[in-house]
Amino acid sequence: MEPKKLTMVVFSGDMDKAVAAFNIATGAAASGWEVTMFFTFWGIKLVQQGGLTGRSLFGRMLGLMNRGGINRVGPSRLNFLGAGRWMFKRMMKSHGAAPLAELQKLAGELDVKMIACQMSMDVMEIRRDQLIPEVAEVGGVAAMLEEAGQSQATLFI
C-alpha cells in the first residue's frame, strides 16, 4: 500500500502560520505520510537563510526590510516592532512547544520535501544559494500541481 501524500502551499511568513505549517508537516511525516511543502511569496522567507538579498534598488530595499530566515519571523498579530516575536518564543518555551527552527530542522530529518517557488525568488531577488540546504528543489506552479495532483490532501497556509 502506498503512503498517503500531503501537499502544503505555504504562502505566509508569519510565525503562527509557520508553526502550524511545520507542525502539520512533521506530524503527517511522522505518521508515514509523504509531505511536500511549496513555499511561495512571503512563505519563501521561511526557507531563506537570512541576510540581505536583492540586486535592484527595490530588491535591496525589500531585502533590508524583510531579511528572512526562520528566526526573524514575527506573529501575524501583536508583533509590537519585534517584541511580539520575543514574547511568543518565551511563551512557547515555557509551555514546552518546539521552537520554529527546531520544527524546520525536524521536517528535514523526516524527509519533508521542500520546494521554493521560482517566481517568488525571482520577484524578491533571492538566489538559490540563499536558501537553506533542506530545500530539495526550486520549481513553479507546475511542480506544486504535480505534487498536489498525487495528494490525498492539499493545504494552503
Image (tube, helix red, strand yellow):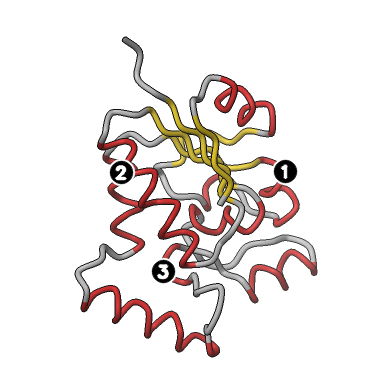
Q: Position of residue 17 (x, y in %)?
A: 50, 61
Q: Position of residue 40 (x, y in %)?
A: 63, 48
Q: Position of residue 85 (x, y in %)?
A: 43, 80
Q: Which residue is mark 1?
A: 119
Q: Which mark is residue 105?
A: none
Label 2 to label 3: alpha-carbon separation: 21 Å
> Splitting the image into 4 quarters, where does residue 91 fall?
bottom left
Identify the mark nearer the N-term, 2 or 3.
2
Judging depth in this view, the residue of 118 and 36 nearest the camera is: 36
User: In the rendered view of the protein, which quadrant contains the N terminus?
Assistant: top left
Q: Which mark is residue 27?
A: 2
Say what secondary structure mark 3 lies in. helix
Judging depth in this view, the residue of 112 and 156 nearest the camera is: 156
Q: Position of residue 60 (x, y in %)?
A: 71, 68
User: Disc 3 marks which amino acid?
Assistant: Asn
Relative placement, left or right, of 71 versus 121 is left
Q: Which residue is mark 3?
A: 71
Say what secondary structure mark 2 lies in. helix
Label 1 to label 3: alpha-carbon separation: 24 Å
Name the mark nearer the viewer: 1 or 2: 2
Question: Which residue appears at 46% of the width and 66% of the height?
Answer: 16
User: Disc 1 marks which amino acid?
Assistant: Met
Q: Residues within 10 Å of mark 1 (few under 14, many from 20)?
A: some
Relative placement, left or right, of 124 versus 148 is right
Label 1 to label 2: alpha-carbon separation: 29 Å
User: Disc 2 marks which amino acid?
Assistant: Gly
**In the picture shown, does residue 146 fall above or below 92?**
above
Identify the mark nearer the N-term, 1 or 3.
3
Question: Which residue appears at 32% of the width and 54% of the height?
Answer: 103
